[in-house]
């Protein structure tokens, strides 16, 4: 939605084994965000050893790159449950990693806001869920997950939709983000 009364969000999260981000929009007068796209990636061995701030920054950069078609050319709010990233755009002295991130950030017009971890449930779920799938039997896990969430609204629909569209959930990303 391109209207001025719509707020676009990029919400990201990182866990020890994976990162995720999703794009959503909130229209004026509505109380629920609409999810546009969800991205998730398992971390490699080196990335799993990153400190928390670097993993969280990696999740944000991953989301920006993956969701470029939704975010480029529009104002949006990036949300993170890692407070130190909120100040990332205002830091005067940058280390090498932050400097690399800034080159990605320059393509976008956004602010960064803090979203408490207890409210960051979607990005949290996908940063944990997909990396586990990438290590094991995906079809078996999808069947198990469908059984476990049969009574929950929304999550069961997401899993069924992924299966129905034939999305190759288990294929690792071909690009490399360090």
Image (cartoon, rainbow, N blue to C red):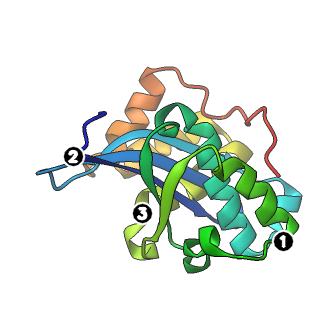
Q: Is residue 71 above or below residue 10?
A: above
Disc 3 or 1, which lies upstream in sequence?
1
The vertical placement of 59 against 75, above or below, is below
| Mark 1 neighbour density, 10 Å: few (under 14) some (14–19) many (20 or more) | few
* Residue 41 locus on image (x, y percent): 67, 47
Q: Which one is nearer the viewer's eye here, 85 or 62?
A: 85
- Where residue 21 sits in the image (x, y, percent)? 54, 51
Label 2, residues with CA under 10 Å away: few <14, some 14-19, many ≥20: few
What residue does disc 1 label? 95
Identify whether 14 is placed above or below 87: above
Residue in front for this viewpoint, 22 or 86: 86
**Mark 1 and mark 2: span between their CA atoms?**
37 Å
Residue visible at 61% across and 26% down in the picture:
168
**Residue shown at 25% from the left, 37% from the top:** 3
Q: Tell me which corner region of the image, top left, top right, bottom left or bottom right, holds residue 157.
A: top left
Task: Read off the residue under disc 3.
Answer: 121
- Quote the CA–CA distance across marks 2 and 3: 25 Å
Q: Quadrant of the N terminus?
A: top left
Kindly tell me whether residue 32 is visible in this rendering.
yes
For label 3, the SS is: helix
Number of the label disc, if any, that sits on residue 12? none
Q: How far is the residue under mark 3 from the one under mark 1? A: 30 Å
* Residue 61 left/right relative to 71: right
Q: Is residue 48 left or right of residue 70?
A: right
Give me the residue at 67% from left, 63% from top. 57
Q: Residue at x 55, y 38 (%)?
A: 67
Residue at which label 2 appears: 5
- Looking at this rendering, what residue extends furthest in the left direction? 29
Count of number-bearing discs: 3
Tags 3 and 1 touching, CB below 8 Å: no
Residue 81 % position (x, y): 51, 72
């Amino acid at each position: 939605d391109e209207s001025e009364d719509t707020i676009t969000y990029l919400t990201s999260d990182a866990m020890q084994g994976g990162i995720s981000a999703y794009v959503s929009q909130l229209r004026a007068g509505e109380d629920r965000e609409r999810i546009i796209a969800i991205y998730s990636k398992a971390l490699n061995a080196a990335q799993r050893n990153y400190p928390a701030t670097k993993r969280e920054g990696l999740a944000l950069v991953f989301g920006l790159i993956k969701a470029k078609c939704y975010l480029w050319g529009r104002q949006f709010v990036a949300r993170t449950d890692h407070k130190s990233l909120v100040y990332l755009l205002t830091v005067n002295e940058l280390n090498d990693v932050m400097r690399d991130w800034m080159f990605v950030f320059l393509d976008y017009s956004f602010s960064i806001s803090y979203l408490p971890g207890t409210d960051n449930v979607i990005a949290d779920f996908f940063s944990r869920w997909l990396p586990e799938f990438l290590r094991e039997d995906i079809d078996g896990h999808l069947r198990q997950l469908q059984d476990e969430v049969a009574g929950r609204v929304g999550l069961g629909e997401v899993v069924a939709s992924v299966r129905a569209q034939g999305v190759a959930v288990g294929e690792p990303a071909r690009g490399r983000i360090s």
